[in-house]
Image (tube, rainbow, N blue to C red):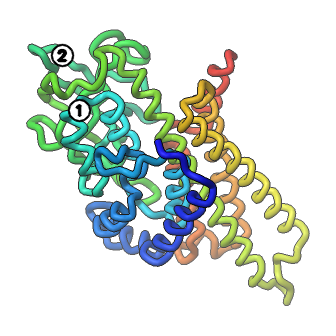
Amino acid sequence: MTTVSVEEQESIRQSARAFVRERAPVSHFRELRDTKDPLGFSLDLWLDMAKLGFAGLVLPATYGGAGLGYAELGIVAEELGRNLVPTPVVANVLGAGVVLLAGTDVLRKEVLPGVCTGERVIGLAGDEGMRFAPYAVATRAEKRGSGFVLHGEKSFVLDGYVAGSFVVVARTSGSPGERDGLTLLHALADDPGVTTTTLEMVDSRSVAKVRFDAVPVEESGILGAVGRGADVLDRVLDCGTAVLAAEMLGGMQETLERTLAYLKTRKQFGVLIGSFQALKHRAAWMFCEIELTRSLVTEALRAVDAGRADARELVSAAKAKATETYRLVTNEAVQMHGGIGVTDEVDVGLFLKRARVAGETLGNAGYHRDAFARARGY
């Protein structure tokens, strides 16, 4: 991983901010939503972002990536979050991350360059229930020759409807809920027996339900050690969760700034409502909570990059705090906007919906508070 200075990080931020503001403001998201775009995101925009290096930012230069860290990708994700830009960034952190860590050299060379150019999405097919539970896996992988045959269904695959392939979390031994006995397998989206159904969420983004009916996986598609998939899975989930928390940080910061701008222009009884002490106090509270969240997210990304022993608990702390703060800030923003805040005319409602979905993705606040407590030995 290339060491990046503070000045270089700021250059990445300014580049991402300028690009997103020009090419993908919130109105861009509204257009995708209102036209029911089948991809759920703009492919042309994503390909142009890939040319800037954003798609392969954390992948090695060997495969066409920039070889930077998650701290830098977090900066890009924060700017995307400011404008609600739908992209497969987190999906590829998860799917491509597994391939990078556990795939064969042949598989890496086959799929990772496409991720870097923006032409390929690798979905992580893990979740099977209503809530995030990475070890609650019932999908079976039955031994056949030197490979396996997959049977099962995944309920919440990020950007799975556009994925060219999937990293499938399957059980080769043990029972659902057990950490041991999980095996990671690579299957193509067009393999016989793979069925993908698109599901729209409350924030107007989409995920996929993916079914695997007797899908054969050759030996070359086995990622890592059989039965020890959780070792790799835990690492990529930490990376993806930290990047998602950074996106949420950008969304809450933008929501606060839009709310402050409204407080400075809206008048009641001939007086700017921003002059009301009660609203000042609430705005100050939001600001303080966002800064606390920023500190946690930044430290979590740094810990992931450094491979620190406390990375898992810091990621859980960051995601729990980001979930709570994003919910707080969007709730307050809607209230401070008054009646118009609950209409589609004003963008703060879009951020509120995104806060709800992002908060549940990869574990809600309750899940991560529990994970943090367990990591601390409670």
Work out whether mark 1 precedes mark 2 in sequence or the reverse, and give the earlier one.
1
Answer with left or right where residue 291 lies relative to residue 193.
right
Vertical comparison of 43 with 173: above or below: below
Q: Secondary structure at mark 2?
A: strand
| Residue type, numbered disc 2 | Glu
Answer with left or right where residue 275 lies relative to residue 27.
right
| Residue type, numbered disc 1 | Asp
The residue positioned 22% from the left and 41% from the top of the image is: 109
**Which mark is drawn over residue 142?**
2
Quadrant that contains the C terminus:
top right
From the top left corner, tell me how far across and down residue 251 is, in percent. 58, 60
From the top left corner, tell me how far across and down residue 91 is, in percent. 37, 46
Q: Which residue in the structure is indicated by mark 1?
A: 105
Answer with left or right where residue 63 lies relative to residue 250.
left
The one nearer the camera, 310 or 280, is 310
Res 287 → quadrant? bottom right
Answer with left or right where residue 340 lies relative to residue 75.
right
